Image (tube, rainbow, N blue to C red):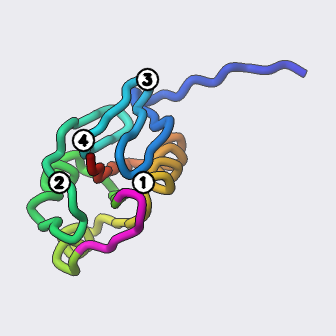
Amino acid sequence: MQLNHERPDYAYALRAADGRSAKVNDRVLEASFILAPNELIEDWNVRDPAALLPEDLAPLLALNPELVVLGTGERQVFPSAAVMAACLTRGIGIEVMTNPAAARTFNVLAGEGRRVVAGFLLTP
């Protein structure tokens, strides 16, 4: 059997994520961040999913996603209806899940070549 090492055709992959940190490629991040297959925006100034405002999604939406994956830490916490509407009224899907689930989902969708953008909320 021949084995081939397959390398993704995108720049960033999540290796691990929980409520306090995430490993993007070989870097450990300890502050909330935004990730697209070819872009990393560090120090996203959001910590609490309950306090998330529609305008907090602006940097994610600026990346022109077809789907936003929102990792809300160790627990799944849905943001307000206004935050959900900020995506849905633009025809952009939004999925809310724990950070580990969001990391797995992001990697699968990025691997499929989808226009996915993920926001990960981390608390120190």
User: Looking at numbered disc 2 in the image, what kind of residue is underneath it?
Assistant: Val
Task: Tell me which secondary structure the magenta stretch mostly adopts.
Answer: loop
User: Looking at numbered disc 4 in the image, what kind of residue is underneath it?
Assistant: Ala
Magenta residue span:
73-79
**Which residue position holds label 4?**
31
- Does dot 3 land on a helix, a strand or a loop? loop
The answer for how far apart the CA atoms under marks 4 and 3 are is 16 Å
Q: Earlier in the sequence, mark 1 or mark 2?
A: 2
Foreground: 18 or 97?
A: 18
Q: Which mark is residue 26?
A: 3
User: Looking at numbered disc 3 in the image, what kind of residue is underneath it?
Assistant: Asp
The answer for how far apart the CA atoms under marks 3 and 1 are is 17 Å
Q: Measured from the top left, where is residue 74 in percent x and y?
A: 42, 59
**Which residue position holds label 2?**
46
Q: Which mark is residue 99?
A: 1
Residue farthest toward the left in the current orientation of the protein:
55
* 78 part of magenta stretch: yes
- Does dot 2 land on a helix, a strand or a loop? loop
